[in-house]
Amino acid sequence: MDWGMQNRMSQLIQADGHCFFLPIDHGYFQGPTSCLEKPGETIAPLLPYCDAIFVTRGVLRAAVDPAGSKPIILRVSGGTSVVGKDLANESITTSIEEIIRLNAAAVGISIFVGSDYERESLTNLSGLVNECENFGIPVMAVTAVGKELEKRDARYLGLSSRIAAELGARVVKTYWCKDFDKVVCGCPVPVVMAGGPKCETELEVMEFVYDGMQNGAIGINLGRNVWQNPHPVAMIRALRSIIHENYTAKEAWDLFNSLKK
Ligand code: 5RP
């Protein structure tokens, strides 16, 4: 691995081999998402506790301070919306020049395996890898399911994750699921867990994150379950304790309860 690629990967994945990415890219297809209407205000108290943020160029420029910012994973796919015909019909939205200009530590792109736009999203990924590898920029593939949340099982996510890695993704972001070890075992690059819609309880979040880490994930990319929680700082600190301090789900939940007071 060349120095630039290694340097960027080490900005994202910390010395313990783990990572906590904070995504605030949701507006790119769903508009002003609840609790993310003013992304700069949402992330200000959370930034000290994450390792990188996942964001589009628009919100980056409008709401993220370039001085002392966390490493940036730039969301570079899009072009569809929740009110449109098909979320899977994405294109690459950001040029390589812009990715370099914004000093991205990595880029993120969704793939939609099994959808009507499977081929387009997969060739978007491979084309992006071709461009980004020239400049030592890692590509994170997101195994997206659009509105079909029921697709999130080990067989489907394992298939999607493996394909993403085969096409050159340096990191794969996928959903946690039962038998998560099967997803990780079949994927030759590091796997990060996405959160999905807000869970009913905080303990539920701690439990799936803990389970995923025990089963081989290197970290999380969790948004709504952090910043839609009424106590987002307590939530991010508790989750961080699982990722970087080996806390169990119960210990992290106790920490959340003590911090939220
Ligand atoms: C949207 C994304 C988000 O980054 C991803 O869904 C993680 O956020 P959340 O934890 O809120 O699901 O890729 O397509």
Image (spheres, helix red, strand yellow):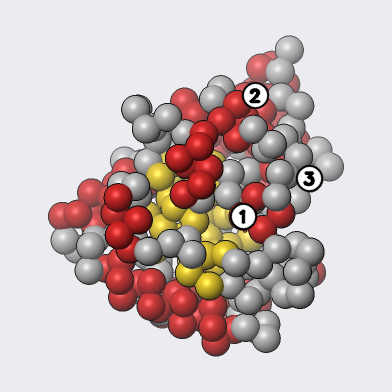
Q: Is residue 208 above or below residue 40?
A: below
How far separated are the C-alphas under marks 1 and 2? Answer: 27 Å
* Placement of 61 over or under 168, stated as above or below: above
For residue 22, what is the image quadrant? top right
Disc tally is 3
Tell us which disc is closer to us: 3 or 1: 1
Residue 158 visible in the displayed image: no
Mark 2 or mark 3, earlier in chain: 3
Q: Residue 166 location, x and y as percent?
A: 41, 80
Q: Is residue 99 above or below residue 72?
A: below
Q: Is residue 96 left or right of residue 172?
A: left
Q: Residue at x 41, y 58 (%)?
A: 107
Label 2 and label 3: CA atoms lie apart by 16 Å
Q: Which residue is mark 1?
A: 28
The image shows residue 214 at horizontal and vertical percentages of: 55, 51
Question: Which residue position is annotated with label 3?
Answer: 199
How far apart are labels 3 and 1 at the CA level?
22 Å
Q: Earlier in the sequence, mark 3 or mark 1?
A: 1
The crowd level at tag 3 (other Cα within 10 Å; few <14, some 14-19, many 20+) is: few
Residue displayed at 31% across by 75% down: 130
Q: Amino acid at mark 3?
A: Cys
* Residue under label 2: 234
Q: Are marks 2 and 3 in contact (CB under 8 Å)?
A: no
Q: Is residue 1 left or right of residue 30?
A: left
| Camera-side residue of 232 and 122 | 122
Q: Position of residue 38 (x, y in %)?
A: 64, 32
Q: Is residue 230 visible?
A: yes
Determine the residue positioned at 70% across, 63% down.
Answer: 81
